[in-house]
Image (spheres, rainbow, N blue to C red):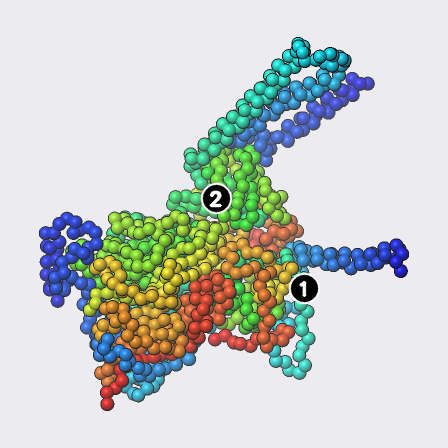
Amino acid sequence: MAIARFAGAALLLAGAMAGPASAQTGTPSDNVPTASVPSDKATPPTAAAPPDDGNWVMPAKNYASTRYSEQDQINATNVHDLQVAFTFSTGIDRGHEAAPLVVGGTMYIVTPFPNRLFALDLTKPGAPVKWSFDPKPAASAQGVACCDYVNRGAAFADGRLFFNTLDSQTIAVEAETGHELWRTQLGDINKGETMTMAPLVVKGKVLVGNSGGEFGVRGWLTALDAATGKIAWKAYSTGPDADVLIGPDYQPFYDKERSTNLGMSSWPPDAWTIGGGTVWGWISYDPELNLIYHGTANPGPWNPEQRPGDNKWTGGIFARNPDTGQARWFYQVVPHDLYDHDAVNELLLLDLPVNGTLRKTVVRPERNGYVYVLDRATGEVLSADPYAAINSSAGVDLKTGELTMVEAKAPKMGKVVRDICPTAPGSKDWNPSAFSPRTGLIYIPHMNLCMDWQSAEANYIAGTPYIGAEVRMFAGPGGNRGELSAWDPLKRAKAWSVKEDLPLWSGALATAGDLLFYGTMEGWFKALDARTGEELWRFKAGSGIIGQPIAYRGPDGREYIAVLSGVGGWAGAVVVGDLDPRDSSAASGWANAVADLKQKTTKGGMLYVFALPQRR
Amino acid sequence: MKRAGGLATAALTAAALTVLLTGCEGVQSALDPAGHQAGRIAGLWWLFLGVLTVIYLLVLAGLLIAAIRPRRRGRLHQGPAFAKEPPIERRLTRGLTAWAVGTGVIILTLTGLSYAVDRDVLGLTGRAELEIEVTAKQWWWQVKYNDPVPSRSFETANEIRLPVGVPVRVVLKSQDVIHSFWVPNLHGKTDLIPGRVNETTLTADREGRFRGQCAEFCGFQHANMALDVLAMPRDRFDAWRAAQLSSAPAPGDALQEQGRQVFLSSACVMCHTIHGTSAASRVGPDLTHVAGRLSLAAGTLPYNKGNLAGWIADPQRIKPGTRMPVTGLSPDQLQGVVAYLDSLK
Amino acid sequence: MSSPFHSAVRTALLAIPLAGLGLAACDREDREPRGAPVGDSGPAAITQGSLYAGEPSPPRPSHREYENNAYHLSQGKQLYTSFNCNTCHANGGGGIGPALMDDKWIYGGTLDNIYATIVQGRPNGMPSFRNKIPEQQVWQLAAYVRSLSGQTPKAASPSRNDTLNAKPAEQRMPKEEPKGSSPGGPNLEGRQ
């Protein structure tokens, strides 16, 4: 397979060299020969995306984060028959952002705070509870969770489940019995540290990072020994190089990322100690290059005037050696972030023909509205194209990798800067995209919102938020607040898109049946034709959907689609927190964007599992 | 008798003038310039004073002459008056024309001169080597020393230190109401307006300590919103700057340690910053090097340990309405906090 | 009856209460920078439910010196931002913490209840500000929190916003009438 691809690449390279010089410029996809060699389309590396065994062991499905299932029983012709197979109430009414996991006939669900873990026996009718585990996290942690008390899922490896609790513990549980194996306290809620991300297990190490960029915490990613829970390494996102694990291996592509102790010198004195850069998003792993990829979140506080400088190493992407944590490269997506643009979205590992050459890339639909394509071996920016309405920046210089900001939209103290697109949660927040190698498209669930912003002096008081901005969000151009875009990474353009009234806060799932699944915040769970975007099926769940759908092969050999409903998250805070949308700055501006949500849905967590009717 | 009265008046006037002129000297006087801009402004002021005094005296003299000169009756009202212009009429016309032209020339010259001085004073802006950002708050001054390398920037309060002979750009902001930044010995006034960024440039020509003052009524404690400006030789300034960049020193004894703990666990931490500790709020002044400052509470009290204790114990008596509250520390706690803060040189 | 003397007396009689009213209005602006202690605010003073053993306790005296005073309310408004209340509760609409401008009070809506909530903290995430905010500032904050839902006199409530103007100023907010609550007693809708 690798050889075949290499040959294809060589062929392509030769073709491009033989072609006119203009083939190197412009839209490369127009010039790439459309021969049927495997490398003329995007594919995830096989090592990171092995063939589907019917299980779903990590929220991103695989190390390449494609969220693509090879199950194809449910397809465009029969999806209209899809019906509920069973449901399960989690008994918790906060935002359910997690992906269920399925391993060998058992489904595992981790709920929002209080982070209960359920194992459902799929071999029995109705999938009864096999065991449940209550970690009993500290209730006060709810006060330092910026955006609802969510949890984005557990991870399974070697008969163990790993998950994080809101009060900053990582816990390992025996998957068969639900017995606790170890728990490690990693953060202090009195400093505002929480944990909401889904761990990733790589080579016997559990990778977890903290949340709390709105509380003046210092971000980190740490690797725990999967057997014992002991810290193997810890990489901070700010501070001296020794803390950031920047050493001799560090070879960034751009010179501006190369200097000693930038994590201190690019901040006002001491500001890096409360500077954010948390690691609450997604991690991908390339076994061939032996590199993990993770983002770092926004610098704190939001008010940029309080932290002159580039604020390294926040708002960027790190490639690290998973064994030692040592950084290989770093690219700062948003130096001196102006808008709370965490760079922690999903990182899809794809091998892409770029300008006629097959490149090992990492693709990310970024919060600032661009789809970034980076060389995942070097950190070079190969392209960055807008997928949503943007007026706060004017594109990325591919020579320097620098994002050009629009001065008129830059926040200023004492001034309301109006109509900034995209907003603080970005064109797209944490909710992950999916990639189908069959269609070659990346399905991006995103938003179409703009905002007014006023900066104010932020006061750091440990245990309280450290923000310094008032925001009010509203629908962007066109009036639709959400959109699902199918992005063609070769043409660097949208193949099709579907407009949604409400912002999309759920993940996407692509299947080999050429279907695309996602949910809306009012509770519709939808199946689209992955090639055309035509809606084929929809189901109304009890509460809004902000979870991540999955597909698996049940013990009976049939294909199932599962998703958690239960509105919430930052976007759904107006419902779960019973906020008052008469205050347009409530929920950091979200209340204004979804002021109608309280009339459209109510809270409550419920698992829905769908299947085709059984033939008798 | 008349003579004696005149003498007395003259003596009194002289004495008053002396007093007035000595008033021109001092830490807060536009007539005792210590900087290029203030010098030009003062020069212009003296020129205006001179020219206008001469004119004033001329006018007074004219009035006096007109008042005491015996009237030559009838002359102007004789016969067909304007049949032939009498010489006196011609003289009057010429005199008035000359007076008007003279006035115009003087006004134009003075206007031109003030324009030139303005240009000169503003022309310095581009050559600043140092940038200081001053944010006015009710009722104190936040002072940030900016640097292209962010980690070499630092913050202080109610005190500006400048190297002698170096143009310093002062960026002026306000966070609540309109204030005005005025260090008379160095420059004229510039307003600080919420939502706007103003700029001025200061250049100190000689060493010295000067007093700046808010010059736009800004509320209850407007009068007690002052700042100290210290012009110092370059080497001493650089040493001071390097010291400001360091974090607060660790407590040196048990009392200071106790004070530090009180500081971090009481109301102090809600408003103040001390670098090197977890205190990083920005409601009140940065206290990292508070003991090295010349005054307390925006020029209200000279800095010393006793004043510091008094200020913390009851700020509302010293500066009623200040945002610093009565924190209700016990005497023991107060003693510790004062010992700790006094160690932050 | 209609003699000049009588009419003068009438005018005088009318003028006295009018002057009194005028002077009373001065309370609105009275600046008491130290703030007056308002008595017992310990746990014993606070009722957290609306169910009593025996006859209901008499309502607590309302602390008019804070709620009716524009100076204290505007100080409270400034402190609400300075002490990061707004970063959780927004301009009353809520966010990380619950809304403060609606008719629901999880832990009670009287000045005492709010004082207690600020000082003691609450188990589901409200931090305790014990020893961190001087007593009179807590009262100012508590009074301001009540102004968010229009519980304070319009004449005293803050009349303008300094920032984004995310919602009308407190003075223009309609008064919310908490349902099912009695003096000192909160609405018992719990929080998960």
Q: What is the x, y in percent for residue A272?
A: 40, 54
Decide if residue A272 is on the left or right side of residue B273: left
* Secondary element type, mark 2: loop
Residue A284, given in percent of the width and then of the height, sits at 27, 65
Pick the residue in front: B19 or A341.
Answer: A341
The reply, left or right, for residue A214 in relation to residue B62 is: left
Image quadrant where residue A148 sits: bottom left
Q: Chain of mark 1?
A: C
Q: Classify mark 1: helix, strand or loop.
A: helix
Return the residue nearer the eye: C156 or A598. Answer: A598
Tell me the quarter of the image containing the N terminus of chain B: top right
Furthest residue in direction bottom, as rendered = A616
Q: What is the three-letter code of the residue carrying label 2?
A: Val
Give the image quarter of residue B33: top right
Instruction: Give the labeled residue for mark 2.
Output: B197
Q: CA distance from mark 1 to mark 2?
A: 41 Å
Q: Residue at x 59, y 53 (%)?
A: B323
Give how far across and how far down residue A257 sits, in percent. Answer: 30, 51
Q: Residue at x 47, y 70 (%)?
A: A577
Q: Is residue B244 visible?
A: no
Taking the image as drawn, is residue B314 in sight? yes
Mark 1 near mark 2, Cβ–Cβ under 8 Å?
A: no
- The residue nearer to you, when weighing A459 against A563, is A563
State the mark number for residue C64: 1
Q: Residue at x 51, y 55 (%)?
A: C163
